[in-house]
Image: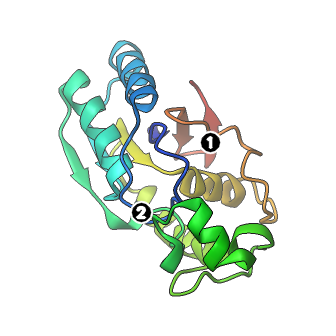
Amino acid sequence: MIYLMRHGLDDENYVGGWSDVSLIEDGIKEVEESARWIRDNLDIKSIISSDINRAVESANIVGSITGTPVTLDSNLREQNKGLLNGLDKSIAIEKYPKYMSSVDKYTIYPQGESLLQLYERIKIYLDKLMKIDDNSLIVTHRGVINMIYYILNNIELDMDKKRFNVEHASIHELDKDNKLIRRIK
């Protein structure tokens, strides 16, 4: 088994994507709680994290509580929202109203990618992910974990971000042998 964890809560006044926003206090607390659960319930040997700041901060918290080394992998990045990455949402709505209200899976963010492109990127990366050593923890983003749910369950991609209950600091078990994924915390 390998495990996936979504990063903790960050400042949601900013567009996420490839932004470098940090965890907020509540996000740090929820990651610490998940890290203690991991320490007490799983036998994690390594942590592989997205190189986006909020994921790195989350991985480092888990690593410090579990005593597990952290490595970074840019393949685990969230959807690239291009010029909108890290913008204050009120500014993004003003400058890019189309991208803040009426996107679909084909909408490509300016200098970024579409949800469908994220799906294709993760579909390719999933082969590498399935070869990662058992007892690894992957710290990443809702978009990445959602794409794995879509792919492994053979569900057509849609815009429902909440479909698979990938909440901040939630933990998901990926059964590589049976190609199944489920939330465990």
Residue type for callout 1 = Ile
Q: Quadrant of the C terminus?
A: top right
Residue type for callout 2 = Ser
Q: Is residue 32 above or below residue 141?
A: above
- Where is residue 150 drawn, in percent x and y? 71, 57
- Where is residue 15 drawn, in percent x and y? 54, 61
Contact between marks 2 and 1 (CB within 8 A): the answer is no
> What residue is at 43 percent from the left and 66 percent from the top?
18
Mark 2 against mark 1, which lies toward the viewer?
2
- Compare residues 153 and 55 and report the one nearer the observer: 55
Q: Is residue 67 left or right of residue 80?
A: left
* Sequence-wise first label, 2 or 1: 2
State the residue position of label 2.
19
- What coloring was used for the rendering? rainbow
Instruction: Please indicate, yes or no, whether residue 149 appears anywhere in the rendered image.
Output: yes
Q: How many tags in the picture?
A: 2
- Compare residues 131 and 108 and report the one nearer the observer: 108
**Label placed on residue 28:** none
Return the residue found at the far top. Answer: 40
- Compare residues 43 and 86 and report the one nearer the observer: 86
Q: Is residue 45 left or right of residue 108?
A: left
State the residue position of label 1.
181
Q: Is residue 65 left or right of residue 147?
A: left
**How many angstroms separate mark 2 from mark 1 (CA)?**
27 Å
> What residue is at 74 percent from the left and 78 percent from the top?
98
Q: Specify few, some or many for label 2: CA neighbours under 10 Å numbering under 14, 14-19, or 20 or more.
A: some
